[in-house]
Amino acid sequence: MKKPCQHHTHKKQELSTLTSRLRRESRKVTGPRSAILEILRHHPHPLTNKEIFAELPAGECDLVTIYRAIQLLEKLGMVKRFDFGDGAARFELVAEGADGHYHHLVCTQCAGVVKIEECFPAEIERQIATKNRFQAVTHRLEFFGVCPDCQK
């Protein structure tokens, strides 16, 4: 029962749109924040703080600054944290007005990530909620396996 995840957004957000969101929240648009947003907007999958740091030009900022900036962006709802069970938090941009609802397929050997387009129908969530007398049920789902490159 495949269904495209209605929350997915494939359109790249413009950097000016992202920095405007920061300004609306009365936050400064610093060089490191702009650089982090620029990196995240060009990646199709979530990145760790260390991966973001590795993408920055040398001397742009330190790792602590990245951790603080990501924490702020998460608090503002501009990025969403993902945990793929390996102890490293990963972060991905969330379009304004979206909830960051995504599913992923993660390679257990190289940690490569593929965004999954399918999502559970809302009816399954309603059935689970009703059966267990829960309200406001949502879900997170990650699949794990070995990618084609690692199978070689």
Image (cartoon, rainbow, N blue to C red):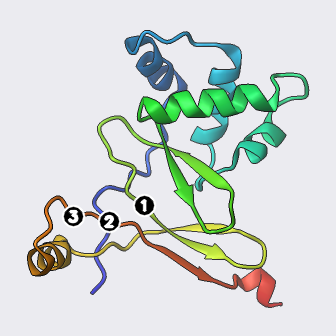
Q: Find disc 1 in the rendering and name its residue.
A: 102
Q: Percent position (x, y) of residue 83? A: 57, 60
User: Where is residue 56 shown, x and y percent of the image?
Assistant: 80, 33
Residue at x 69% of width, y 85% of height: 146
Q: Earlier in the sequence, mark 3 or mark 1?
A: 1
Tell me if 35 is positioned left or right of 91 in this view: right
Q: Quadrant of the C terminus?
A: bottom right
Q: Earlier in the sequence, mark 1 or mark 2?
A: 2
Instruction: Indicate the position of residue 58 as horizontal and vertical percent values.
Output: 91, 28
Q: Where does residue 97 sit, x and y in percent of width and height?
A: 29, 37
Residue at position x 63%, y 48% in the image: 43
Q: Could you give the CA–CA distance between mark 1 and mark 2, rounded to whole angstroms?
A: 7 Å
Q: Secondary structure at mark 2?
A: loop
SS assignment at label 3: loop
In which quadrant is the N terminus drawn? Answer: bottom left
Q: Is residue 103 left or right of residue 134?
A: right
- SS for callout 1: loop
Q: Earlier in the sequence, mark 2 or mark 3?
A: 2
Q: Nearer the viewer, mark 1 or mark 2?
A: 1
Q: Please name which of the two marks, 3 or 1, marks the residue nearer to the observer.
A: 3
Q: Report the disc number at residue 5.
A: 2
User: At label 3, which amino acid type do we have?
Assistant: Val
Q: Which mark is residue 137?
A: 3
Q: Is residue 9 above or below residue 78?
A: below
Decide: is 55 above or below 14: below
Q: Could you say which is closer to the camera, residue 138 or residue 1?
A: 138
Quadrant in the picture for residue 21: top left
Residue at 68% from the left image edge and 61% from the top image edge: 87
Instruction: Give the quadrant of residue 123.
Output: bottom left
Q: Nearer the viewer, mark 2 or mark 3?
A: 3
